[in-house]
Amino acid sequence: MFPPLAILIARYIAAAWESPRLSGIQSGSFALLVVLSLLVIAGLAGPQHYLERYSDWPDVEVPRWEATVVSTRVEYGDLSALAPYIHAQNAILILGAVSALILGFGNRRAFGWAFLSLTLTWALFLVVLNSSLPLLDQRRSVKALAAVLKSQLDPADEVASYHAYYQDLPVYLQRPVAVVGWKGNLQFGVEVNERSGGWMTDDASFWKGWNSPLTVYMLTEQETYDKLRSESSFKSRVVARGLYDVLLSNKTS
């Protein structure tokens, strides 16, 4: 789809470059300003989208088991650090759209300047966006916890993600990871569990291994860990902790 679409857009831009009064230039510039203004308003009203794959804004309820990152109305501390980037991105979009609209109404050379303005707008937007991404590392990735685990992991040890699914964990550990009590888009894997080598498992099977002589590591969300810790029968050792997730071992010493 994209190669032919790019050709059609380039064909129109080439024609507009030679004929600045080409139909659609002014209306397109105005439409761009309206769309970007709505995008900015949406970004300011629902910044939780910067942190979650699914969120409750604007009142879209997503079941917990369906979301890779759990939907919640709790405001994360990441947002305060992310706010300057969000405001900078919004300013860049609005200024770029306004300048393109103004330049689009000019003389023969105006379209070239308008096109240059939009090019710089998207370039600056992507630079600011890319600079903000490291702030989301601990929310969207468990790389730091996986590095701690990999440094002390033996081949015979077992690793499981408990009531959560971390897509990057098997990649960083370079080994299979059991998924306990979670379905989501892995529903098919649950249905063929007997043929999948047991990487999808239930709570009963997991706790049987947790209480065995084997060394078992568990990665779970902080909220889930708090619930487990309130149970008197739960024994564990915190190996490492992130802002949102906790790495545990069944070996307390």
Image: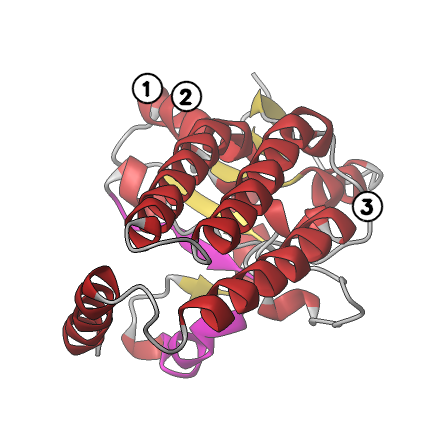
Which structural element holds mark 1?
helix
Which quadrant would the N terminus be assigned to in this image? bottom left
- In the image, 106 versus 142, the foreground residue is 106
Q: Earlier in the sequence, mark 3 or mark 2?
A: 3
Can residue 212 be seen?
A: no
Question: Residue most toward the front?
Answer: 107
Q: Residue at x 70, y 59 (%)?
A: 55
Amino acid type, mark 2: Val
> Is 127 left or right of 98, judged from the image as shown?
left
- Total number of numbered discs in the rendering: 3
Residues tagged 1 and 2 counted as in contact (Cβ below 8 A): yes
Q: Earlier in the sequence, mark 1 or mark 3?
A: 3
Which structural element holds mark 2?
helix
The boundaries of the magenta stretch are: 175-193
Label ID, residue 74: 3
Residue at which label 1 appears: 151
Q: Is residue 226 above or below residue 108?
A: above
In x, y percent, where is residue 72?
A: 76, 54
Camera-side mark, 3 or 2: 3
Residue at which label 2 appears: 148
Amino acid type, mark 1: Ser
Whole-angstrom CA distance, mark 1 to mark 2, is 5 Å
Q: Residue at x 47, y 31 (%)?
A: 128
Amino acid type, mark 3: Val
In x, y percent, where is residue 181?
A: 58, 63
Whole-angstrom CA distance, mark 3 to mark 2, is 28 Å
